Image (tube, grey):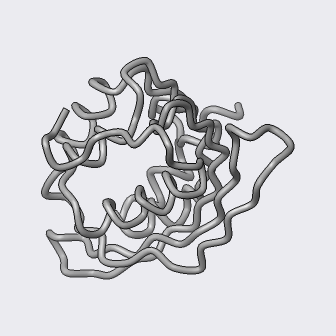
């Protein structure tokens, strides 16, 4: 775990997500991974064809983030709406993530909804919903995504 970010067991789930959003823009990928529990399960129900539907474990997440390094730079998180639930460990987050595709300099915005479980100051589970068309458009692969969706439906 990075020295700069340690789990704060007294943080609420809402505070952990606020820290996550700050770290996305101002921290490193390692610092971001360190906000997750070692055995976290991140589910991606809307992942496009060919992409994993889940990321099991912090080190798998860290490896995926390192592999994506250099593709884009996150610049801002806005329109954040956090919703508490009846379960004190769970919070729902709606937000927009702004970034720049480094190869083209093209800015893009991605819309997300996350259902997050926080335990002992770390994200223990997350179900992340995102607009795959926004992501594909930013990377210039919308036709490939649509072809993959058609093929998967057939």
Residue 44 at least partly seen: no
Is 88 displayed left or right of 19 in the figure? right
Is 150 displayed left or right of 76 in the figure? right
Q: Is residue 15 above or below residue 46?
A: below
- Report the residue at 50% width, 43% height from top: 10
Q: Is residue 5 above or below residue 137?
A: above
Q: Which residue occupies the foreground of this view, 127 or 147?
A: 127
Residue 126 image point, x, y percent: 57, 37
Q: Which residue occupies the foreground of this view, 129 or 8?
A: 8
- Report the residue at 55% width, 41% height from top: 47
Q: Is residue 150 above or below residue 62?
A: below
- Report the residue at 24% width, 47% height from top: 5
Residue 107 image point, x, y percent: 33, 81
In the picture as drawn, the residue positioned furthest to the right comes out as 86
Residue 96 image point, x, y percent: 53, 72
Is 44 displayed left or right of 51 in the figure? right
User: Which of the 4 quarters of the picture holds residue 115?
Assistant: top right
In the picture as drawn, the residue positioned furthest to the front comes out as 10
Residue 73 at least partly seen: yes
User: Which of the 4 quarters of the picture holds residue 81?
Assistant: bottom right
Q: Which residue occupies the foreground of this view, 2 or 130?
A: 2
Residue 74 image point, x, y percent: 30, 69
Q: Quadrant of the C terminus?
A: top right
- Report the residue at 39% width, 58% height from top: 141
Q: Which residue occupies the foreground of this view, 88 or 98?
A: 88
Q: Quadrant of the N terminus?
A: top left
């Amino acid at each position: 775990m990075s020295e700069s970010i340690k789990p704060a067991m007294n943080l609420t789930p809402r505070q952990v997500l606020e820290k996550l959003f700050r770290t996305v823009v101002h921290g490193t990928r390692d610092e971001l991974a360190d906000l997750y529990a070692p055995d976290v399960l991140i589910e991606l129900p809307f992942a496009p064809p060919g992409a994993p539907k889940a990321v099991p474990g912090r080190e798998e997440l860290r490896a995926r983030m390192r592999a994506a390094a250099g593709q884009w730079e996150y610049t801002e998180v806005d329109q954040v709406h956090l919703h508490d639930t009846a379960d004190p460990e769970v919070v729902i987050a709606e937000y927009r993530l702004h970034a720049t595709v480094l190869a083209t300099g093209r800015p893009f915005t991605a819309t997300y909804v996350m259902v997050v479980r926080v335990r002992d100051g770390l994200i223990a589970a997350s179900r992340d919903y995102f607009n795959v068309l926004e992501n594909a458009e930013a990377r210039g692969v919308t036709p490939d995504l649509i072809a993959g969706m058609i093929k998967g439906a057939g």
